[in-house]
Image: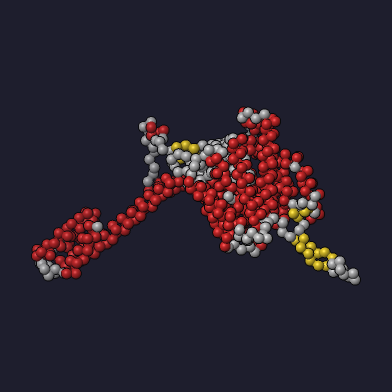
């Protein structure tokens, strides 16, 4: 199982420390799971080396012979397309699409709630008649209330997991499922007081991270915030290197530098004088850092967690949030820090944002049972172009200059972080395959040209031989009746011998034909 500090890679969906020949061993009931902040948990199945000889070959048993021909190729193609790895890839594509849609939908629903509305208010300066004028009014400006409300929905984690376990494993009772989830924490040495303390600390970190993310949407466009939040993968690597003592990879340091450069470009895209952009970028970057801290600390404090532990942990976070943080909501409301008109609360987008956020977190934590975690992480960066298209359509946004450059640098850094530890091995293998393919292609082209030229030479010999004495002529019938394969092997040697004899004994031999044969000789020597 892979922890929170590990980074999924491009060439292999898992973190690779060994040579690249790895296969994934399937598990009927995977137990691994992790608790992230957002839809980006990453868990690892068992990795097994594929370098050694298989067991059947070690015992001297020959592997079954594959059928040849068109049917054999069709069967092998069908087997490869329907294998377990291929099915995981197909499922991973669907998961990436669902994660992208849910994450973009939740973010844009929250952004929509901050859009000012036009409200008709009476003009007090007119006494004879009441005239109505349009006024810009912010009816909803409550980021902490939004965070508190959305976090309450995480209470549904364990009930959903509980009912899914009852349906899939009918042999298990409800008591067994609950006992198994709690026993895993007891085996790690957690007492009740210590466990609740950890849950409360993680609840505060969760709420603080989501609050900064939601508050930054009040200032920046959704695309800007999502691009900045994507830098959390670079923060995860840095913290994993320092705290979890993960392996140092130079290309990931380059990725961190690119992400920081992109963040700086976004911070100064509107200048620093009288612009709230800088504060919004700082909030979004802090949200990304908070997400990385949450993931690495969970790996450090909790360790490897099963799906039941993940569901129970999320539900407890929701319960702590609902039970202990509601006084903060009331305090911010009565002090006027947050604008909240109960008659004008945008319930449809608020409920949609909460539901989509719940779906994104469910996919991020549990879909690793059906696919590789790489596809879950890709949903974080694929959401950026989708959100940009929505911003252009809904708000008339424009992406150019420093903003566009910052997003491109963050995207490049994101993919560089996902490079595996032994990425030079993959690059070397890729270059070697490209060179071999180019050599084989050039050899086939050269052979084809040589055969075509040789055929033209045969025709020329037959035509010229009719003009030379009989004792120098090839027998035309014997040349035409020769076996094609035998002629392909010996045509050059026989032809050049004949040409040399013609040149020595008959000077009137065609000058043009001799010049052509000289070119062919040089070509064959090359």
Residue 124 picture location, percent across and down: 86, 66
Residue 246 vertical position relative to residue 101 in the rendered view, above or below: above
Who is closer to the viewer here, 266 or 118?
266
Residue 467 vertical position relative to residue 82 in the rendered view, above or below: below
Quarter assignment of residue 4: top right
Residue 393 picture location, percent across and down: 64, 62
Who is closer to the viewer here, 171 or 363?
363
* In the image: residue 508, left or right of residue 325: left
- Which residue does the image show at 37% across and 46% down from the upper left? 68
Who is closer to the viewer here, 466 or 297?
297
Q: Residue placed farthest to the right in the image?
A: 128
* In the image: residue 347, left or right of residue 268: right
Quarter that holds the N terminus: top right
Q: Residue placed farthest to the bottom in the image?
A: 128
Residue 284 picture location, percent across and down: 64, 51
Is residue 71 visible in the rendered structure shown here? no
- Which residue does the image show at 36% across and 32% down from the upper left? 60
Residue 26 vertical position relative to residue 190 in the rendered view, above or below: below
Is residue 207 visible in the rendered structure shown here? yes
Residue 504 picture location, percent across and down: 10, 64
Quarter that holds the C terminus: bottom left
């Amino acid at each position: 199982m892979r922890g929170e500090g590990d980074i999924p890679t491009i060439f292999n969906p898992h973190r690779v420390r060994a040579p690249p020949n790895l296969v994934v061993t399937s598990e009927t009931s995977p137990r691994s799971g992790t608790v992230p902040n957002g839809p980006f948990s990453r868990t690892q199945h068992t990795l097994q080396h594929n370098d050694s000889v298989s067991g059947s070959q070690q015992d001297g048993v020959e592997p079954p012979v594959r059928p040849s021909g068109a049917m054999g190729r069709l069967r092998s193609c069908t087997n490869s397309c329907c294998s377990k790895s291929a099915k995981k890839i197909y499922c991973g594509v669907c998961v990436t699409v669902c994660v992208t849609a849910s994450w973009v939908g939740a973010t844009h629903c929250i952004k929509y709630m901050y859009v000012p509305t036009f409200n008709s208010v009476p003009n007090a300066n007119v006494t004879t008649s009441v005239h109505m004028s349009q006024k810009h009014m912010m009816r909803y400006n409550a980021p902490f209330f939004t965070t508190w409300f959305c976090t309450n929905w995480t209470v549904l984690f364990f009930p959903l997991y509980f009912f899914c376990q009852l349906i899939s494993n009918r042999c298990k009772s409800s008591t067994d499922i609950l006992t198994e989830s709690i026993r895993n924490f007891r085996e790690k040495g957690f007492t009740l007081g210590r466990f609740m303390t950890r849950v409360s600390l993680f609840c505060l970190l969760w709420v603080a991270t989501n609050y900064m993310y939601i508050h930054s949407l009040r200032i920046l466009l959704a695309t800007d915030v999502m691009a900045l939040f994507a830098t959390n993968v670079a923060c995860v690597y840095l913290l994993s290197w320092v705290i979890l003592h993960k392996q140092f990879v130079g290309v990931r340091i380059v990725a961190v530098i690119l992400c920081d450069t992109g963040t700086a470009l976004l911070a100064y895209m509107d200048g620093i004088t009288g612009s709230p952009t800088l504060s919004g970028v700082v909030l979004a970057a802090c949200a990304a850092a908070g997400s990385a801290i949450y993931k690495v600390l969970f790996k450090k404090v909790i360790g490897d967690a099963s799906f039941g532990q993940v569901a129970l942990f999320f539900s407890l976070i929701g319960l702590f949030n609902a039970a202990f943080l509601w006084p903060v909501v009331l305090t911010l409301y009565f002090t006027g820090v947050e604008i909240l008109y109960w008659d004008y609360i945008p319930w449809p987008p608020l409920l949609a944002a909460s539901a989509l956020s719940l779906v994104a977190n469910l996919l991020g934590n549990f879909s690793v049972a059906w696919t590789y975690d790489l596809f879950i992480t890709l949903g974080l960066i694929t959401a950026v172009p989708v959100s940009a298209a929505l911003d252009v359509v809904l708000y008339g946004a424009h992406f150019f200059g420093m903003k566009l450059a910052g997003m491109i640098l963050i995207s490049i850094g994101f993919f560089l972080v996902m490079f595996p530890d032994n990425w030079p091995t993959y690059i070397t293998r890729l270059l070697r395959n490209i060179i071999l393919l180019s050599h084989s292609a050039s050899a086939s082209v050269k052979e084809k040209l040589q055969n075509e030229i040789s055929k033209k030479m045969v025709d020329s010999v037959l035509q010229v031989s009719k003009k030379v004495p009989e004792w120098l002529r090839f027998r035309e019938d014997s040349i035409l009746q020769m076996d094609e394969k035998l002629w392909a092997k010996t045509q050059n040697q026989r032809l050049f011998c004949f040409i040399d004899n013609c040149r020595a004994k008959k000077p009137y031999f065609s000058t043009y034909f001799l010049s052509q044969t000289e070119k062919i000789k040089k070509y064959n020597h090359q």
